[in-house]
Image (spheres, grey):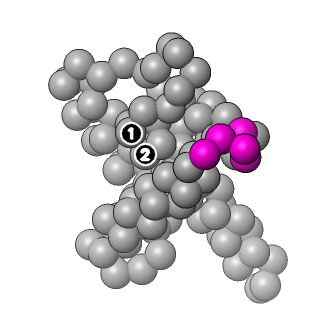
Amino acid sequence: MAGEIGQYWLDQITAAQGRAGWLAALDQHVAEVRNTVSRPLGYWPDVPGLMAYASGFVGAAVASGWQPPQDGQPDWQSFRLAAVCHLVQQAQEKAGHLRGVN
């Protein structure tokens, strides 16, 4: 669920480049998630660490009554999940690049 919602909003946010503040908000969430996940690991976030973060995040959000927005406007949680998906893509690209170096 987290991946599907996050990817949907990542696609919407990046496609709507004219929407005031959406890309800036995404960038802020990316930085916050990266710092939150990498701090305990001591290195750049990897896919398992990001997925664990997303799972815990969605569990807490749903437990507090959150539901994905239906009005076409991303909320704070949607931006956070989009940021996780963005970081997962970066981690996968980095892992693929490292495999190609060998």
User: Residue 87: where, in percent of width, then height?
Assistant: 55, 59
Q: Is residue 99 visible?
A: no
The local crowd at label 1, few if under 14, some if 14 to 19, many if 20 or more residues have their Cα within 10 Å, is few
Looking at the image, the residue that sits furthest to the bottom is 102
Q: Nearer the viewer, residue 70 or 4?
A: 70
Q: Residue 90: name its quadrant.
A: bottom right
User: Residue 102: where, in percent of width, then height?
Assistant: 77, 85
Height in image: 52 above or below 55?
below
User: Residue 60: where, in percent of width, then height?
Assistant: 22, 34
Q: Is residue 91 visible?
A: yes
Q: Which residue type carries mark 1?
A: Trp
Q: Is residue 18 magenta?
A: yes
Q: Residue 56: name its quadrant.
A: top left
> Residue at the spot x=42%, y=33% of the render?
75
Looking at the image, the residue that sits furthest to the top is 70
The local crowd at label 2, few if under 14, some if 14 to 19, many if 20 or more residues have their Cα within 10 Å, is many
Residue 69 is left or right of residue 13, and the answer is left
Q: Which mark is residue 76?
A: 1
Q: Nearer the viewer, residue 77 or 37?
A: 77
Q: Which mark is residue 80?
A: 2
Tag 2–tag 1 contact (CB < 8 Å): yes
> Residue at the spot x=59%, y=35% of the render?
9
Height in image: 38 above or below 68?
below
In magenta, the rendered stretch is: 16-20
Q: Secondary structure at mark 2?
A: helix
User: Residue 36: where, in percent of width, then height?
Assistant: 32, 65
